[in-house]
Image (cartoon, grey):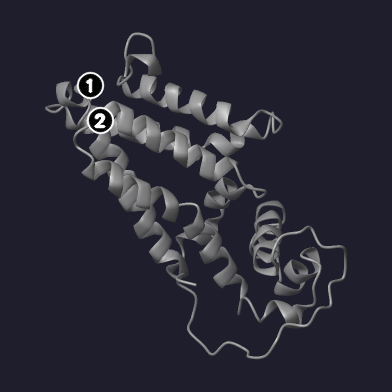
Amino acid sequence: MTGGAAEGPRRVGRPRADRLRPASGRPPREELLCAAAELFTVRGYAATTTRTVAERAGMRQATMYHYFRCKEELLAELLESTVAPSLVLARRLLADAGRPAARRLWELCRSDVMLLCGGPCDLGALYLLPEVAGSGFARFRRMRGELKDAYRALLAATPAGVELARDRAGLALRGDLVFGLIEGVTLIRRADPDRPVAAFAEATADAALRVAGAAGPAGRTGL
């Protein structure tokens, strides 16, 4: 784990096979993360205990400690998992200056939506937790800040961004609108969870480029 939770020795030994309900097919660590995401967003972080997370995941609390030491560690890993893959992609796209910036921005938007909406957990809703502002999640905030800067850099490299080069406030606003749209997609998807994720991600990326003023006359096809 690379989150900001307090350091301390992990328990050693082999986890007990003592599931309290039928397994979902997910590995125990992923089961715990999904259970924590559900409880944090429904009950709130403060009202959730490690015992309730373990029970929701179908295991005993003692077993959970073989994977996570505390609920702060659970939340830190969940938060960072919403950013880390997109950040890797963003760095690669920024370095790929041989292709149109609008196309690269569209690819980042699409991939980010797939990440936030493609899993079994509603990860984007975790951003609304007030505890995210705490010191234990500083690493996540740094990662998210770098990802937001990558969005802005790609937008600035599009023809629309070049035209706005002298209007820093206007360019920053468009970047914030695009980033906000992408991070807010989980709230939109809740209304229709059966919509195919890939189609939803592409439609959102198309909309993001229109918001940014970076799409061609035919939307994505004009990139």
Residue 161: image location, x then y, percent: 21, 26
Quarter location, residue 192: top right
Mark 1, Cα crowd under 10 Å, few <14 / some 14-19 / many 20+, is: some
Please, which residue is most extreme toward the left here?
166
Quarter location, residue 95: top left
Residue on which the image places disc 1: 160
Q: In which quarter of the image is the C terminus?
A: top left
In the image, residue 83 sits, relative to residue 9, either above or below, namely above
- The amino acid sitting under disc 1 is Ala
In the image, residue 94 sits, relative to residue 181, either above or below, namely below
In the image, residue 219 sits, relative to residue 199, either above or below, namely above
Residue drawn at the location 50% of the way across and 38% of the way down: 113
In the image, residue 129 sits, relative to residue 28, either above or below, namely above
Q: Is residue 67 left or right of residue 127?
A: right
State the SS at label 2. helix
Residue 140: image location, x then y, percent: 42, 60
Residue drawn at the location 31% of the way across and 52% of the way down: 146
Using the image as rendered, state which of residue 89 and residue 137 is in the foreground.
89
Q: In this view, does 153 lie to the left or right of 53?
A: left
Residue 152: image location, x then y, percent: 27, 38
Residue on which the image places disc 2: 101
Residue 206: image location, x then y, percent: 43, 22
- The amino acid sitting under disc 2 is Ala
Q: Which of marks 1 and 2 is nearer the N terminus?
A: 2
Please, which residue is most extreme toward the front here?
98
Q: In this view, does 150 lie to the left or right of 108?
A: left
Mark 2, Cα crowd under 10 Å, few <14 / some 14-19 / many 20+, is: many
Residue drawn at the location 32% of the way across and 28% of the way down: 103
